[in-house]
Each structure stands twice: as structure tokens, then as C-alpha cells.
Image: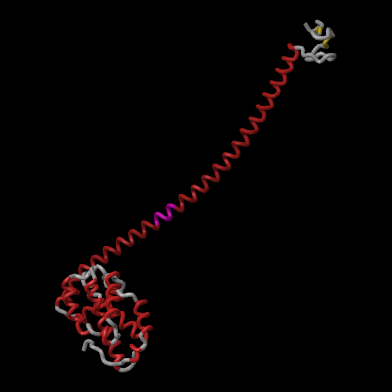
Amino acid sequence: MENKQIICRQCGSIIPPGQARCPYCGSSYEPEAEREYMRKLEQVRADLDQVGEAGAEASSREIKRVSSRVMRILGVILVFAVIVMGIVHWHQQRENTRNRQEYTWQQEVYPELNRLYETEDYKTLLEKVRAYEDEGHDLYQWEHRTFCELYESTIYADLFLESRKKGLFGEHDAVQLLHDELKFRGLDHRKELPSQDRQRLHGLLAPYENDLTEIFLMTEEDLQFFDRKLRESNGYPSYGDCEEYVRNHPEICQDTEKGPHQE
């Protein structure tokens, strides 16, 4: 077969052995062209196998490198999560312990405060409340805490009124006194006040009823303005409103006539 001459079908020339095309007219010799194609195909497959092996090795190295980095990151996240959970657990345990201690303290102290309230020993009651709060205790859950707050405001109001009698009544004093006086006027808007507290405070605050008109020279329009503001704020006056009013009425600080106050 190898010595058999191959004649070109197109031009009749002899095609040398192993040639896939006629060297004279360029026509393809199918059997040899097919063998050449198969040789090239095998070479391509071999090349692809080498590339695949190299790519697989490179991919394996990259996967290991990325996996190592991911594991390190996950390790850091895990350690951080454990630390955070530990801090949260410690904080919760500490808070629970504090709450239990505070509850026990309240069971011991509240009866004493209630006794002072019932006997109307308000001065001693306020001293106790101040001392306990200075120690870091929270008394806002005690039902008469707002009563003590307003009673304490009467003490401050009396100090400012006494200063006014002596002619030592500056703008800052006037603002502070007005703020306290408006607290008294907003008494009925304090929704958190028990009815018993409200009744007792009405008696204690009676001496201050005319201060807004006699000391602060308020007109009916002024009173309506502050009444509306007190309704909107549940009985808590705005310090800014007090400052603005006093600035707009400098005659307040010049008038040192004695106003009604607790003796």
C-alpha cells in the first residue's frame, strides 16, 4: 500500500506518499487528509490534557489558599462572637442580679416611705427620697415619686420668693420660679398622679395660686397660652417658654412686692 502510486483525480499528477494535497493543483487527497486531521486532533487532545492537568493543579492551589483565608476569617468571627456572647451574658447576669437586689431593697424601703407619706411627714419623706436617689436607687416606680417632686418644687419656690422679698431677684431666679409655678398650675394634667396625691397637692399649692398674675403679671391671654401648652405636655412646662416670657417682661425682676408663698 505504501508503494502504490496515488493519482490526483483533478489533474492526473502523482501525489507523493504522505501528502494530503496534490502539489500541482492543490486538490485534497481524502484518506491522507483524514489521517493528518486525526494526527492534529490527537495533538490537540494531548495539549488539552496537559493544560487541564496544569489548570487543575493551579485551581487546587488557589482553592486551598482561598479556603485557608476563609477559615482564618471564620475563626476570627467565631472568636469575636464568643467574646460578644460572653459580654452580653455577663451583662445580663449583672443586670439580673442588680434587679433582684433592687427589688429586695424596694420591699424593705417602700413601706417606710409610705408610712411617712401617710403621716404627712413630707420633710422627712423628701430627705429619705433624696438620700436614696443619691445612693443610685431608682424610685420612679414608687407611686408617690411625682408627689415628692412637686413638693420639692414648693421648697425651691419659697427660696426664690424669699430672695424676691429681699430684692435679690434676677432674671435667672424669675425663670426658675416661673417654671415651678407653672408646674403647680399643670397639676391636673399630670396623668400619672394618684387621686390621693392630687388632693394633697391642691392643699399644699393653694398659696401659689395667684403668683402668676401678681408676680409674673400675666394677662388672661398669657394664662390661656400656658394652659394650652401644659395640656399638650401633660403638665410639664417648657423651660424655654419660661425664659422667653421673662425676657419679654423685664418689669418682673424690678417688681419686688411680696407675693403669696408658704410660711
Please give the range of residues in magenta: 81-86
How many marks the image carries: the answer is 0
Asked whether, in this view, residue 231 is left or right of residue 73, the answer is left
Which quadrant: the C terminus? bottom left
Looking at the rendering, in which quadrant would you find the N terminus?
top right
Specify the farthest residue to the front.
221
Task: Kindly tell me whether residue 138 is visible in this rendering.
Answer: no
Magenta stretch, main secondary structure, is helix
Quadrant position of residue 42: top right
Q: Residue at x 23, y 66 (%)?
A: 104
Position above or below: 140 against 217 = above
Percent x, y of residue 159: 28, 87
Q: Specify the color scheme.
A: secondary structure
Instruction: Pinpoint residue 31: horizontal percent, then vertical percent.
Output: 73, 11
> Does the magenta portion include 232?
no
Q: Foreground: 141 or 236?
A: 236
Corner quadrant of residue 16: top right
Which residue shows up at 36% across the image and 60% down it?
Answer: 91
- Identified at 19% across, 82% down, the residue is 206
61 with respect to 74 (left or right): right
Q: Is residue 131 left or right of residue 24?
A: left
**The furthest residue to the left:** 119
Asked if one can make out residue 146 in the rendered structure from this viewpoint, the answer is: yes
Q: Position of residue 116 (x, y in %)?
A: 17, 77
User: Residue 33: image x %, image y %?
Assistant: 74, 15
- Residue placed most toward the observer, 129 or 12: 12
User: For this rendering, which residue is in front, 187 or 135?
Assistant: 187
Q: What residue lies at 52% left-to-right and 47% top-to-bottom?
A: 72
Vertical placement of residue 51 versus 165, above or below? above
